[in-house]
Image: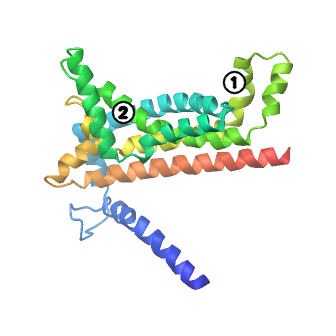
Amino acid sequence: MKLISKIYIALIIFFLYAPIAVMIFFSFNSSNSTAVFEGFSLRWYTELFANDTVTTALLNTLILAVSSAVIATVLGSFAAVGIHSYRRKWSKGAVMSVTNIPMMNPDIVTGISMMLLFVFFGRMLALRNSLNFITLLIAHVTFNLPYVILSVMPKLRQLDTHLSEAALDLGCTPFKAFFKVILPSISSGIVTGFIMTFTLSLDDFVISYFTTGPDFQTLPLLIYSMTKRRVTPDMYALSTLMFAAVLTLLILFNFAQARATRKKADR
């Protein structure tokens, strides 16, 4: 049974990471072939940064991902604290059920419904473009919020309520007690929520497709437009750099979290 379980896990890891490994391998190919490796070269990395269309789409994607992640993290953290403070279980359960709807809802349903909402308000306000960067940002914040709340809530459940009460007894205002006691205790959940929302916003396509305007194009939308012709190998190079950046971010976060856990255990 142990051998079978090891083979099963190995197959899962292989099917998950084999496509990424192939993409990284062919990003260093000297030719534009995706079947024959003709030699090691950084050609596609140099061409990537010389392509203004790709770099603009990448910049747009990063601006959107960082903005939506920051807003969703702030709103989601305060929302989690508010939900956690509910005394009645039924009200807390009802709010959590409503909060989870954007996460469980199919992306295409969320995208179409938000597009109709934005177009309705755009016509009501007589706007020239009903869909733009603002509508795209609102859509990304909306589907990111549940992930932040779900990341912060477990940390709030682990929090010792006597700590904030002690801070209040020692003269802190509720506002100061939150930033001095509660916020540092749930910081790991907040960082986890930020990283998760950043990555989700970075690669979202369906909701972005329905809620963006003609003046703002993200990287997933650009790649989709290329699939109608042919995806150029510089996209392999870009995807490799993005994968390496996200992987490095996750490793650093896990290292910092493990270090903080060791320090807490030493105390």
Percent across and percent down for residue 149 are: 56, 38
Could you say which disc has been placed on residue 79 in the image? none
Residue 70 visible in rendering: yes
Percent across and percent down for residue 185 are: 71, 36
The vertical placement of 175 against 75, above or below, is: above
Residue under numbered circle 2: 139
Badge 2 local density, few (<14 within 10 Å), some, or many (20+)?
A: many
User: Quarter of the image holding residue 67?
Assistant: top left
Badge 1 local density, few (<14 within 10 Å), some, or many (20+)?
A: few
Identified at 38% across, 54% down, the residue is: 240
Residue under numbered circle 1: 179
Q: Amino acid at mark 1?
A: Phe
Q: Nearer the viewer, residue 188 or 111?
A: 111
Percent across and percent down for residue 33 are: 21, 65
- Tag 2, which secondary structure? helix
**Image check: 86 left or right of 61?**
right
Q: CA distance from mark 1 to mark 2?
A: 29 Å
Q: Nearer the viewer, residue 123 or 223?
A: 123
Q: Nearer the viewer, mark 1 or mark 2?
A: 2
